[in-house]
Image (cartoon, helix red, strand yellow):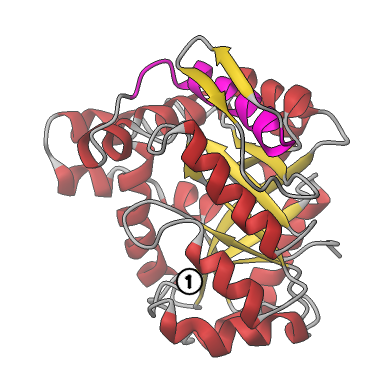
Amino acid sequence: MAKRWGMTVPFFDRTLAESKELIAELPALGYTDVWSAEVGGTDGFVPLALAGEWAPGLRLGTAIVPASTRGPALLAMSAATLADLAPERFVLGIGSSSPAIVERWNAGEFSKPYSRTRDTLRFLRKALAGEKVTERYETFEVKGFRLERAPKTPPKIVLAALRPRMLQLAASEADGAITNWLAPEDVGKIRAEIGAETELIARLFVCVSEDAEKVRALGRRMLAAYLTVPVYAAFHDWLGRGEVLRPLHEAWAAGQRQDALKAIPDEVVDALIVHGDAATCRARIEEYVANGLTTPVLAPIPGGEVPIPQAVRDLAPGTR
């Protein structure tokens, strides 16, 4: 049984305000963590601030906030605020994100993603320790910044990492690695890059449903949106799915969206999305853990015959 068992907040079927009661229930169900995300819905920090009040004791983590959509000092201030609200329980997850999020949506520059993430990590280490930072990094420069109120205990920092170079950076300079859209059999390859002791966190998309064809149709839409992003395409090429996903990428590049969806094989959907009845889903999650995943972070998706609140309860680690 996993020592940690996380949940993604807020839930896909409701607003943050409507999530209060279900979040408050998580500790009693056996969940240890809640992890936010930051794409085009809620920001990464506010859901955790509220969850810290609604469910005291849970570990709070961002998975992830982009390293390029906030200035370095603002990112440090947001992290310091959460670290003050939840001492020793907040984990800051950062990553390079994607060109769409950084450039098209936030008017930023998606340049040298590895270097920007590395530089942000190194800046945050100093800033969150209360140091005054004046330093020229490869991708930005900071002159004379010091947090007015540095946290008594600096938060752990973990990196979104999909391939060897970033995974190795997460192991050598950060406190852990975050990944997603992987199968249980992929965990060993990632673990080989980060070693046995580094915390490995992964968001696992789960649909509690025994209607496999319905789940696969839903899953294909989700996977097409992610696996056609260059960083995820490269990730799955590295994992060994390059050839099986080639028809997807060719159809997508040609603008043939429906053909692209049809090109995703059932076995890929079944590998990357956890589905079945609740017992089957829990057993599948435990496969990830047995293969080396430290912290599974469940993301129950709507569309199955089991409503999300019941899925959250049925997927809890203590449920049998």
Please state, as top left, top right, bottom left or bottom right, where the N terminus lies in the image.
bottom right
Q: Is residue 310 visible?
A: no
Q: Is residue 138 above or below residue 223?
A: above
Q: Which residue is mark 1?
A: 10
Please state, as top left, top right, bottom left or bottom right, where the C terminus lies in the image.
bottom right
> Is residue 236 found left or right of 247 in the rendered image?
right
Q: Residue at x 62, y 17 (%)?
A: 165
> Is residue 162 found left or right of 220 in the rendered image?
right
Q: Quadrant of residue 50?
A: bottom right
Residue 128 painted magenta: yes
Q: Is residue 320 above or below residue 142?
A: below
Instruction: Provide the residue span drawn in magenta.
Output: 110-130
The rendered magenta stretch, by its main secondary structure, is classed as helix
- Quick one: label 1, few (<14), some, or many (20+) residues within 10 Å? many
Q: Is residue 24 above or below residue 251?
A: below
Q: Residue at x 57, y 20 (%)?
A: 119
Taking depth in this image into account, of 300 and 60 the one nearest to the observer is 60
Q: Is residue 57 visible?
A: yes
Q: Position of residue 32 (x, y in %)?
A: 76, 69
Residue 241 painted magenta: no
Q: Position of residue 29 (x, y in %)?
A: 74, 84
Residue type at tag 1 = Pro
Q: Residue at x 32, y 35 (%)?
A: 102
Q: Is residue 185 above or below residue 8?
A: above
Label 1 element class = loop
> Is residue 260 found left or right of 293 in the rendered image?
left
